[in-house]
Image: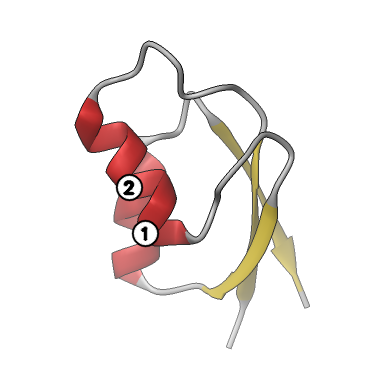
Amino acid sequence: MARLKITQTKSYIGSKQNHRDTLRSLGLKRLNDSVVKEDRPEFRGMVQTVRHLVTVEEVD
């Protein structure tokens, strides 16, 4: 199964509370943090919510 590397590239200061909660749920705590998650619809939806704060790369 494919995996995604999700990196927080922008600060969440000034963002909606929902966006902050989504970043926490993904496991991102501070700027330039990265996590590797499986490519599942649940994570894709979370990334879609905060797409302006993160970058996504596919990892094999």
8 to 60, vertically: above or below: above
Quadrant, the C terminus: bottom right
Quadrant, the N terminus: bottom right
Q: Which mark is residue 47?
A: none
- The amino acid on which the numbered mark 2 sits, given as a three-letter code, is Thr
What colour-coding does the image apply? secondary structure
Residue 19 image-quadrant placement: top left
Task: Name the residue at 62% across, 40% down.
Answer: 30
Task: Name the residue at 45% across, 16% down.
Answer: 13
Task: Name the residue tied to disc 2.
Answer: 22
Q: Secondary structure at mark 2?
A: helix
Count of residue discs: 2
Q: Nearer the viewer, residue 4 or 13?
A: 13
33 to 41, vertically: above or below: above
Question: Is 50 on the left or on the right of 35, as rendered?
Answer: left
Q: Position of residue 14 (x, y in %)?
A: 37, 11
Q: Position of residue 41 (x, y in %)?
A: 32, 68
> Badge 2, how many Cα within 10 Å: few under 14, some, many 20+?
some
Task: Name the residue at 50% across, 72% down.
Answer: 39
What's the distance in space between the residues labelled 2 and 1, CA to CA?
Answer: 5 Å
Question: Is 56 on the left or on the right of 18, as rendered?
Answer: right
Task: Name the residue at 30% across, 53% down.
Answer: 45
Q: Secondary structure at mark 1?
A: helix
> Badge 1, how many Cα within 10 Å: few under 14, some, many 20+?
few
Marks 2,1: beta carbons within 8 A: yes
- The amino acid on which the numbered mark 1 sits, given as a three-letter code, is Ser
Question: Is 33 on the left or on the right of 45, as rendered?
Answer: right
Q: Which residue appears farthest toward the top when viewing the image?
A: 14
Q: Which mark is residue 25?
A: 1
Q: Position of residue 43 (x, y in %)?
A: 38, 63
